[in-house]
Image (cartoon, helix red, strand yellow):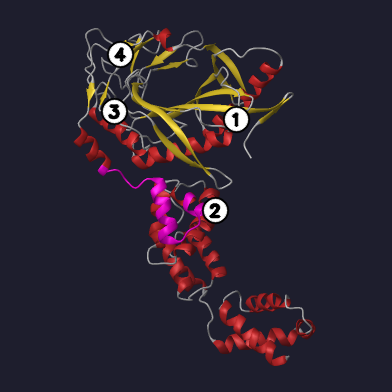
Amino acid sequence: MSYSLQGSTGPWEVVVGLEVHAQVISRAKLFSGAATSFGSEPNSQVSFVDAAFPGMLPVVNAECVAQAVRTGLGLNARVNLVSRFDRKNYFYADLPAGYQISQFEHPIVGTGEVEVELADGTTKAIGVTRLHLEQDAGKSIHDQHPTRTLVDLNRSGIGLMEIVSEPDIRSPEEAGAYLRKLRSILRYLGTCDGNMEEGSMRADVNVSVRKHGDPYRTRCEVKNVNSIRFVMQAVEAEASRQIEVWEAGGTVAQETRLFDSGRGVTRSMRSKEDAHDYRYFPDPDLLPLVLEEDWVAGLKAALPELPDAKRARFIHAYGLSQYDASVLVAEQATAAFYETVAEERDPKIAANWVTGEFFAAMNRLGRSIEDPPVSATALGRLLDLIADNTINGRIAKDVFEAMVETGKGAAAIVDEKGLRQVTDTSAIDAAVDRILATNPDKVAEYRSGKDKLFGFFVGQTMKAMAGKGNPGLINETLKRRLAEQS
């Protein structure tokens, strides 16, 4: 069932397009040699070009160009062998040149698409209109002085990729899925770290509403939303506002708005500019950007295995479900962790442990896959102890928790705590006989047809053996003994 928002006049369709600004991973800025590291002292990473000193000429950073091309290839998009830089003219205090060098009519990357997976198991292709390169502006700081606004130009000139989607998104869920998938692709490619908290990936959210089947109506742009959750909330909040306006007989004005995450509403920022308001024209200091086909082909050949291809391989080679494979490939580091655990082991058991106990421990401790509570090698060795019947699955969970707490290996913990599984049939026979002897009423009920009591006998036997009995042998022994008594 398609998503819609209910108004007083019935359901409304939500139409969303996203403009994602992704900071290019590069040691230098797009048109200067200044550094790009996050969190440096204000105005400590500013060249004369970034500060727009008279007579300074921009020189394009070839690595930023390569990163944009890699991203285009990763989005199954058309790479334009000839593109052009333009000046986007507007005045703002943190834009010292009075213009931003961007790409308008001739972007470096054309149309592509991103396939997203939705909660109901379906997939949807979201079109990508274009990807262009542009330089970031500086940052205005309003909380350092009671009456003055300060400017930090460290960010000025940093390379950005603006990735513009088609208006194909129809719900907050699809918007979130698109951003998660795009972020995953960028991180796999190593072209953007996707850190929305630090502002290296942020989204402008274009929202409109219409009755199903009607033409598009006026859209509003919600500017600079810096988390996937906030993007999803902004879609719903802005769509609900527009529905109220239309149903009250009003007209939605094309404008730029801000999302107030505290109140869950959007607020008007300024009237929306059109392209002609910026007076774009080709940058006279930069020649057209001409790429060689062989160079692009070389970049394509060197691309890593991307999430969709990796997911398909995990399903085919490891026999994983679509869901488990999607979870494991969402982050490149998680996929690599899983493959280390699964190497020469049962891949489904490995997936269950990684997405189960391991993820739970990581979330509980607030750790990341780059700083895991247990290494992939150590987790694999724990699974080896289950596979060779040294311990059973229940004991393994206790051992895993001890590994997390102490940092010790599974084998050492098993030896220290005497947790080796009992496979001695005589010991198991004796434990089963004791349980049956002390529960004659339950044995009688079982013999009268209450088969579910078998689980009771298993549990009691495991308890009597402190959880160290081999479950398979206990089951076999119980079946044999109960059959003998019937």
Image check: 358 left or right of 112? right
In the displayed image of the protein, which residue is found farthest to the bottom?
484
Mark pair 2, 4: CA separation: 48 Å
Helix, strand or loop for disc 3: loop
Helix, strand or loop for disc 4: loop
Closer to us: mark 2 or mark 3? 3
Q: Which mark is drawn over residue 99?
A: none
- The correct choice, above or below, for 179 with respect to 290 in the image is below
Q: Which residue is mark 2?
A: 360
Image check: 361 left or right of 466? left
Mark pair 1, 4: CA separation: 37 Å
Q: Which mark is drawn over residue 51?
A: 4
The x and y percentages for residue 482 are 69, 87
- The correct choice, above or below, for 170 with respect to 268 in the image is below
Residue at image position (57%, 69%) is 394
- Whether tag 1 and tag 3 are in contact, CB under 8 A, the answer is no
Mark pair 1, 3: CA separation: 35 Å
Q: Earlier in the sequence, mark 2 or mark 3?
A: 3
Q: Earlier in the sequence, mark 1 or mark 3?
A: 3
Helix, strand or loop for disc 1: helix
- The correct choice, above or below, for 374 with respect to 464 in the image is above
Check disc 1 and give the amino acid type: Gln
Q: Earlier in the sequence, mark 1 or mark 2?
A: 1
Q: Quadrant of the N terminus?
A: top right
Q: Is residue 20 visible?
A: yes
Check disc 4 and give the amino acid type: Ala
The x and y percentages for residue 372 are 44, 52
**Crowding near pointer 2: few (<14 within 10 Å), some, many (20+)?**
few
